[in-house]
Image: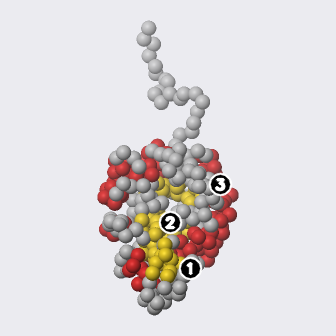
Amino acid sequence: MAECGPLTIAGREFGSRLILGTGGFRSLESMAEALAASGAELATVALRRVDASARGSIVEVLEEAGCTLLPNTAGCFTARDAVLTAELAREAFDTDWIKLEVIGDERTLLPEGSELLDAAETLVAEGYVVLPYTNDDPVLARRLEDAGCAAVMPLGSPIGSGMGIRNPYNLRLIVERADVPVILDAGIGTASDAALAMEAGCDGVLLASSVSRAEDPARMARAMRHAVTAGRLAFESGRIPRRLYGEASTPTEGVPELT
Amino acid sequence: MKVRLNGEPCEVREDASVLDVVAASGAEPEGRGVAVAVDGEVVPRGEWDEFELREGQRVEVLQAVQGG
């Protein structure tokens, strides 16, 4: 996917601007197929209590696919739990990278801003590359960047909702002010949502449910790959201004008088 | 003695180490994607063997799963 430039986070280059969340796939096989179709080079992984009946190793599948692991702190409601989860992830996966999630509400799964910032500050001080999942709040995004986060990852709408980008104006404000990569994280429902995020100037898109819970995950993963590339190319190309009235593209001079 | 393994009571021998409990949990001790916390503190993999547990300690043995 070399059609548009690479995504660079904390000095590391990724050929794809699509990051795949691995939650919600019916099987590891389905995940592997979608991963290949998506072209993603970075994929999330979570930590849960050992289930002795679980078969297969997600780590092996992702590594065989040449994917870089991005552990998350999903399910944490406090900075303390998120920091401990990040420390466990560093042990488990041998990486300093962490997708930081601190949730404030079980129904909407929206981030808890103050705990998130608190956890981000602690983890940055401990040497982590922190990628925080945040609200579409330009001020909080700025605070997270100032705290030393390697990217900011605003939501389009709640996790798994498929509601797309509900506040494109806020997203635009975040993109305009950010000096670190902006990754649209959560809320993508279909390909046009991903394209819209990229057209708005996001550096990348992180999505899971829209692919993993689609009827045909691998096919949707391919759609997302094209959407992210198309959106990025459009952003880099300088779109035409919106006009209230039409403007003919065919010359208006030399029109014959036929009747 | 008794410890708590992933929220459940678990009977282990007196000088049980973290490594023993990891094995009892069904996790693959050599496998990547496994991490352990005892009473809310991370125990690095290199210390599993020597870390002796005490009665009543809370051991969380975690593994990689799909998510995010």
Residue marked by disc 2 = A72
**Image-based side of B2 in relation to A59, left or right:** right
Kindly identify which chain the residue marked by label 1 belongs to.
B
Picture quadrant of residue A66: bottom left
Amino acid bearing label 2: Asn
Residue marked by disc 3 = A137
Query: What distance separates the C-alpha of mark 3 from that of mark 2?
Result: 21 Å
**Image-based side of A218 in relation to A203, left or right:** left
Identity of the residue drawn at 64% across and 52% down: A173
Amino acid bearing label 1: Asp
Amino acid bearing label 3: Asp
Picture quadrant of residue A246: top right
Both marks 3 and 1 on one chain: no
Q: Pinpoint residue A157: horizontal percent, then vertical percent.
A: 56, 49
Considering only vertical position in the picture, is A257 above or below A195? above
Kindly identify which chain the residue marked by label 2 belongs to.
A
Q: Report helix, strand or loop for mark 2.
A: loop
Q: Pinpoint residue A168: horizontal percent, then vertical percent.
A: 59, 46
Local packing at callout 1 (Cα closer than 10 Å; few below 14, some 14-19, many 20+) is: few
Query: What distance separates the C-alpha of mark 1 from that of mark 2?
Result: 21 Å
Q: Colour mode?
A: secondary structure
